[in-house]
């Protein structure tokens, strides 16, 4: 991870810790599909989302357990796992994810919970090398009954 990313993460963690529960910091990549059906250029940004549970991280976890940001990662091994971290505890049965390749072919996976805020996604088979994938959070409810905003996603590419 480059120095700029580390600095950005430290800032975001500090800001999120200082924010009240009524105002949460949301880190987005802008990699989603816009209203016009066109994917905007990946641009990191910060949005304030009042009173909402959000995705705070989407990580790649390699075989040694080392975590890295999944957004636009081009060094994902074919045998890794993924984690999605939320800002509040979720009703686990309500989480809906989509995991697809560049052709929109669904990737079968197992979902386990590491804790009430962290879902781990493990593909049922190794991913294809040098292939683009997208992992998306479609819906979920936190334990207070609030929906999380739709559209958090991470686009990434596996190593050749």
Image: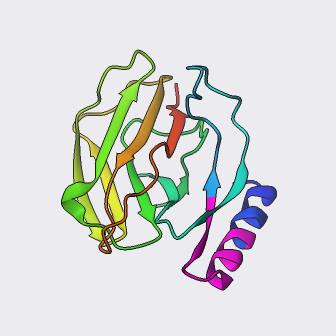
Is residue 149 in the magenta section? no
Front-lying residue, 24 or 118: 24
Q: Which residue range is magenta in the image? A: 11-26
Q: Is residue 112 left or right of residue 3?
A: left
Q: Position of residue 114 (x, y in %)?
A: 30, 68
Any part of residue 65 in sight? no
What colour scheme does the image use? rainbow
Residue under the image location 57 percent in, 38 percent down: 75
State which quarter of the image contains the N terminus: bottom right
Residue under the image location 42 percent in, 39 percent down: 135
Any part of residue 23 in sight? yes
Q: Position of residue 23 (x, y in %)?
A: 61, 73
Q: Position of residue 125 (x, y in %)?
A: 24, 34
What residue occupies the far top of the structure in this picture? 103
Front-lying residue, 13 or 65: 13
Residue under the image location 46 percent in, 33 percent down: 134
So how many labels did they put on this image?
0
Q: Position of residue 85 (x, y in %)?
A: 44, 63
Is residue 20 in the magenta section? yes
Q: Is residue 83 left or right of residue 140?
A: right
Q: Is residue 156 left or right of residue 12?
A: left
Examine the image and state in which quarter residue 65 appears.
bottom left
Relative to residue 57, is residue 153 depicted above or below? above
Residue under the image location 71 percent in, 29 percent down: 41
Front-lying residue, 50 or 139: 50
Q: Is residue 147 left or right of residue 16?
A: left
């Amino acid at each position: 991870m480059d120095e700029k990313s580390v600095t950005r993460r430290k800032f975001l963690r500090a800001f999120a810790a200082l924010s009240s529960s009524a105002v949460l910091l949301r880190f987005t990549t802008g990699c989603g599909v816009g209203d016009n059906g066109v994917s905007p250029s990946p641009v990191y940004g910060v949005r304030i989302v009042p009173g909402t549970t959000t995705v705070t991280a989407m990580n790649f976890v390699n075989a040694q357990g080392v975590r890295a940001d999944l957004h636009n990662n081009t060094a994902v091994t074919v045998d890794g796992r993924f984690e999605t971290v939320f800002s509040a505890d979720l009703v686990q049965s309500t989480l809906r994810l989509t995991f697809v390749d560049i052709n929109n072919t669904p990737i079968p996976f197992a979902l386990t919970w590491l804790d009430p805020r962290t879902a781990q996604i493990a593909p049922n088979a190794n991913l294809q090398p040098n292939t683009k994938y997208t992992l998306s959070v479609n819906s979920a409810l936190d334990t207070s009954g609030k929906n999380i905003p739709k559209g958090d996603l991470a686009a990434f590419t596996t190593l050749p």
